[in-house]
Image: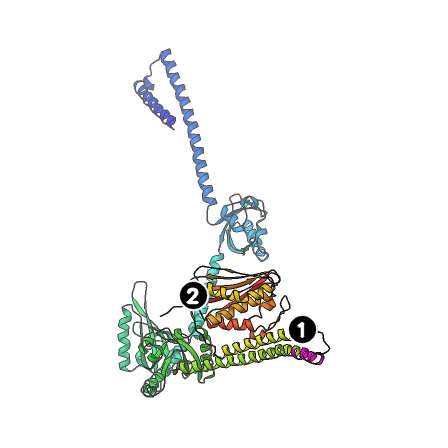
């Protein structure tokens, strides 16, 4: 461009020089020029000609560039146009299209060229497109139509086509608009209008539009029913025709409010033809035009005559109700029919029951439904719902939490109050504190269950004991009978053997009776319980010493794993009995040369004492039967030692007497561990 400017400057300089020469040498008075001047002039003309040629070439290039720029701008405008453009040959093939056209067909541009345009139309649309396309070439006029485009994997599109023939009468230029969304919107608008029209005509509330002069310009059938006249008798009529002068004055005052832009809601008395009076509630919404000018109001009318009568009846009965509830035991209430049962009224005794005043419930600071125990809420709601449904009184007992966080039992008797249409509108009833009675009932039920269980268990236990006592007595009677009969014929060894059997059986039977007597005393509460501070290591040593002989007989070792200075709070006699029974069991079920361990573990709450052995252990089934009086059973020891299982029951009772618990862990063939807990050092006040 810089060179172009330079050339233009030279050309201008040459023109100026030429004009000066012409002024000096006019053609009419042209003077002969010498050869040198002629050659110089010729040279300048040649240079000028070359410059003109260069300028022409540069102008041509500039023109070409300008055309290409314009073409590019046109191409971008064509391709980015929001509407689709197609160039279609006379035989219906796509010759050229823009990006919007490709998007409408749902395919890439490059795959659409030379495709038949009609192939992308639905079958119904093809019969529309064919005459449309023929008319464009036949009549050479602009044609329009609506067709449906089928898209891959999407819903069909409705498009508007405008077609014209090109200047050579060889191709068709199609302009395509996607009008699918517009048609959907129009259909939705039409459907919405139909719905609103249906709603307007069938809604139970009266709807009317009045102009600024309070004259009706639009009403629905419900409004006709409320006013007691037909549509023709309402349209164009003023509201004053249906109101007393006092009532119409109220309407005019409300109109002033509406003109300021505020909606209004109020009640008035309507005079129907024949002098019938109806109570009406109206909500009036002011209406303004686009310039802000008040053009009237839209009113929604409700006939509240029945409601007013009910309210009046309630007011009249309120005093009677208050007088009545003042003399009823418990708290009388009136509340909503659903959880959380918002309170409309509570008599004063409610404070003595819940710890909350009636005002706290009525002001919604407290909701009575939220005091009901979570486990009882569904049941209470069900009983109330049944009473409402069947229109009868309901009675229900449940727990509530009072202001001190204490759960109380209450009895409620109530009934739903229905309006004239049979719709339940609130609940009335009485709530009585029955905590004392309920506690007594629960305790009686608990005692009855426990007593029944105890009787059943003891019956079963006595049956087992009778069997266990029968066996040793059978042995005693049998061997003593043989001995008595044959004492003169038996040798001394046989006599000694049978006497030993009788003696051993007598010892076992005596131990059984002794354990039974001890257990019976514990069950009846006649066994003294005197807890005291005990050095655990000391009592362990004493117990081990007592059981040493039985252990030595089977070549067993009893090891105590001491923990220094452990003190416990326990009854020394009961603790000794527990340890002896557990060690005796370990000796019984441990083979010769086995080991028994006695140890204790102290923690911040209590002390765990364990007796462990490496004996024969037991099955999981037998493990689950331990400490259960209804499952009492006996198992022979490793040396055929017998037992009744009563010792473990004594251990359980004595441990529980101390507030502890006892359990066992065992694996068949690997031994057992019996553990129990006792409190730490006795706290003396």
Where is residue 185 drawn, in percent x and y?
46, 60
Tell whether 478 sits left or right of 276: right
Tell whether 143 sits left or right of 7: right
**Toward the viewer: 488 or 262?**
488
**Mark 2 neighbour class, 10 Å CA radius: few under 14, some 14 to 19, many 20 or more:** many
Outermost residue, top side? 35
Figure quadrant of residue 597: bottom right
Q: Is residue 503 magenta?
A: no
**Toward the viewer: 142 or 453?**
453
Distance from disc 1 to disc 2, alpha carbons, whole Å, reads 51 Å
Query: What span is in magenta?
Result: 476-491
Query: Which mark sits nearer the N-terminus, 1 or 2?
Result: 1
Type of colouring? rainbow
Name the front one of labels 1 and 2: 1
User: Residue 120, relative to residue 516: is it above or below?
Assistant: above
Tell whether 287 sits left or right of 452: left
Residue 586 visible to an observer of this rendering: no
- Determine the secondary structure under disc 1: helix
Tell whether 507 sits left or right of 50: right
What residue is rendered at 59% in x and 78% in y? Answer: 465
**Toward the viewer: 446 or 3?**
446
**Mark 1 neighbour class, 10 Å CA radius: few under 14, some 14 to 19, many 20 or more:** few
Residue assigned mark 2: 680
User: Residue 680, relative to residue 486: is it above or below?
Assistant: above
For the stretch drawn in magenta, the main secondary structure is helix
Where is residue 177 drawn, in percent x and y?
49, 52
Residue 158 visible to an observer of this rendering: yes
Q: Is residue 486 magenta?
A: yes
Q: Quadrant of the N terminus?
A: top left
Where is residue 204 drawn, in percent x and y?
42, 76
- Determine the secondary structure under disc 2: loop
Residue assigned mark 1: 496
């Amino acid at each position: 461009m810089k060179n172009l400017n330079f050339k233009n400057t030279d050309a201008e300089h040459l023109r100026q020089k030429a004009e000066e020469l012409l002024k000096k040498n006019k053609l009419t008075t042209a003077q002969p020029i010498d050869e040198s001047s002629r050659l110089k002039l010729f040279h300048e003309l040649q240079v000028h000609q070359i410059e003109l040629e260069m300028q022409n070439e540069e102008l041509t290039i500039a023109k070409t560039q300008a055309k290409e720029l314009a073409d590019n701008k046109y191409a971008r405008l064509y391709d980015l146009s929001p509407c689709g453009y197609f160039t279609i040959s006379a035989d219906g093939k796509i010759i050229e299209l823009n990006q919007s056209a490709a998007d409408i067909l749902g395919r890439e541009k490059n795959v659409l060229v030379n495709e038949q345009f009609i192939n992308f139309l639905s079958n119904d649309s093809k019969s529309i497109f064919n005459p449309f396309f023929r008319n464009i070439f036949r009549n050479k006029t602009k044609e329009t139509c609506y067709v449906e485009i089928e898209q891959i994997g999407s819903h069909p599109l409705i498009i508007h086509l405008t077609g014209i023939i090109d200047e050579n009468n060889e191709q068709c230029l199609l302009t395509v608009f996607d009008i699918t969304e517009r048609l959907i919107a129009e259909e939705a608008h039409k459907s919405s209008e139909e719905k609103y029209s249906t709603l307007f005509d069938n809604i139970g509330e009266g709807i009317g539009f009045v102009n600024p002069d309070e004259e009706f310009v639009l009403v629905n059938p419900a409004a006709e029913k409320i006013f007691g006249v037909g549509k023709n008798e309402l349209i164009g009529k003023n509201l004053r025709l249906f109101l007393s002068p006092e009532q119409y004055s109220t309407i005019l005052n409300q109109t002033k409010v509406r003109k300021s832009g505020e909606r209004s809601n109020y009640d008035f008395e309507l005079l129907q033809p024949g002098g019938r009076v109806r109570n009406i509630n109206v909500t009036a919404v002011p209406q303004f035009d686009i310039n802000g000018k008040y053009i009237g109001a839209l009113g929604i009318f409700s006939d509240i005559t029945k409601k007013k009568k009910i309210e009046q009846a309630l007011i009249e009965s309120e005093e009677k109700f208050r007088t009545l509830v003042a003399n009823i035991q418990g708290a009388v209430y009136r509340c909503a029919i659903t959880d959380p049962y918002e309170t409309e009224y509570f008599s004063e005794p409610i404070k003595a029951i819940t710890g909350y005043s009636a005002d706290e419930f009525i002001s919604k600071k407290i909701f009575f439904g939220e005091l009901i125990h979570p486990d009882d809420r569904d049941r209470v709601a069900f009983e109330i719902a049944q009473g409402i449904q069947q229109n009868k009184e309901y009675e229900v007992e449940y727990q509530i939490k009072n202001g001190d966080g204490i759960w109380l039992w209450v009895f409620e008797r109530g009934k739903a109050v229905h309006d004239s249409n049979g719709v339940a509108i609130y609940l009335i009833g009485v709530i009585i504190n029955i905590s004392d009675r309920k506690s007594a009932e629960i305790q009686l039920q608990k005692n009855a269950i426990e007593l029944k269980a105890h009787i059943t268990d003891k019956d079963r236990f006595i049956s087992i004991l009778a069997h266990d006592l029968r066996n040793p007595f059978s042995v005693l009677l049998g061997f003593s009978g043989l001995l008595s009969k044959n004492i003169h014929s038996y040798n001394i060894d046989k006599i000694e053997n049978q006497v030993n059997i009788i003696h051993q059986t007598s010892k076992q039977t005596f131990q059984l009776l002794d354990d039974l007597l001890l257990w019976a005393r514990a069950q009846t509460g006649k066994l003294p319980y005197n807890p005291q501070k005990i050095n655990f290591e000391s009592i362990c040593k004493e117990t081990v010493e007592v059981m040493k002989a039985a252990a030595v007989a089977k070549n067993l070792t009893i090891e105590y794993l001491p923990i220094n200075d452990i003190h416990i709070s326990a009854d020394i006699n009961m603790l000794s009995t527990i340890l002896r029974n557990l060690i005796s069991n370990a000796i019984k079920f441990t083979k010769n040369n086995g080991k028994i361990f006695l140890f204790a573990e102290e923690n911040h709450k209590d002390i765990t004492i364990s007796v462990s052995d490496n004996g024969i252990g037991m099955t999981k089934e037998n493990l689950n039967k331990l400490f259960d009086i209804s499952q009492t059973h006996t198992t022979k020891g490793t040396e055929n030692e017998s037992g009744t299982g009563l010792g473990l029951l004594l251990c359980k009772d004595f441990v529980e007497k101390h507030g502890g618990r006892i359990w066992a862990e065992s694996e068949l063939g690997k031994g057992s561990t019996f553990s129990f807990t006792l409190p730490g050092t006795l706290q003396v006040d």
